[in-house]
Image (cartoon, grey):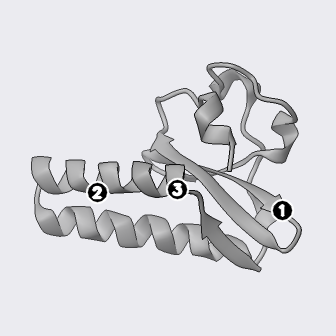
Amino acid sequence: MNVLWSPHAESLLEDIVLGIATELYPDDGIRWELKLREAANGLSAFPPSCPIVPLACYLTIPPNPERLHQLIIKPYRIVYEVVDDEVHVLSIRHGRMLVTIDDTNW
């Protein structure tokens, strides 16, 4: 199963990596990017293994919220859905942040 990242998720990951690299150390940003991408790529083996995003984690509940799963890589939440034979990574946010409508669309 292929794992694909939405442009929104790619942009969020870039912001996370740049933030870590600027505030801590450049190599830390790179390590986090590799860690998060590796975790997301691991979803290809068995994508339904992660729980559905709890309704309490949404700012506004999207249509068909049961399609959205979350992979927790503390302190981050990767939001994804399975579409046919692909895993679509839709968003990556700090776990304390609520999931927005923008985080639920391809």
Q: Quadrant of residue 39?
A: bottom right
Mark 1 sits on what residue?
A: 83
In the displayed structure, would residue 24 be above or below residue 34?
above
Residue ID for mark 3 = 7
37 on left or right of 55: left
Dot 1, how many residues are within 10 Å of its Cα: few (below 14), some (14-19), or many (20+)? few
- Residue drawn at x 68%, y 40% as measured from the top left: 104
Observer-nearest of 54 and 5: 5
From mark 1 to mark 3, how far is it between C-alphas? Answer: 16 Å
User: Vertical placement of 8 versus 49: above or below?
Assistant: above
Give the residue type that dot 1 points to.
Val
Closer to us: 27 or 106: 106
Report the quarter where the N terminus lies.
bottom right
Q: Is residue 39 left or right of residue 24?
A: right
Q: Amino acid at mark 3?
A: Pro
First along the sequence among labels 1 and 2? 2
| Residue 77 position in % (x across, y down) | 54, 46
Q: In the visual, does 79 lie left or right of 69? A: left
Going from N to C along the chain, the mark reached first, 3 or 2, is 3
Q: How many marks?
A: 3
Which amino acid is tagged 2? Answer: Val
Residue at 41%, 69% in the rendered image: 35
- Mark 2 highlights which residue? 17
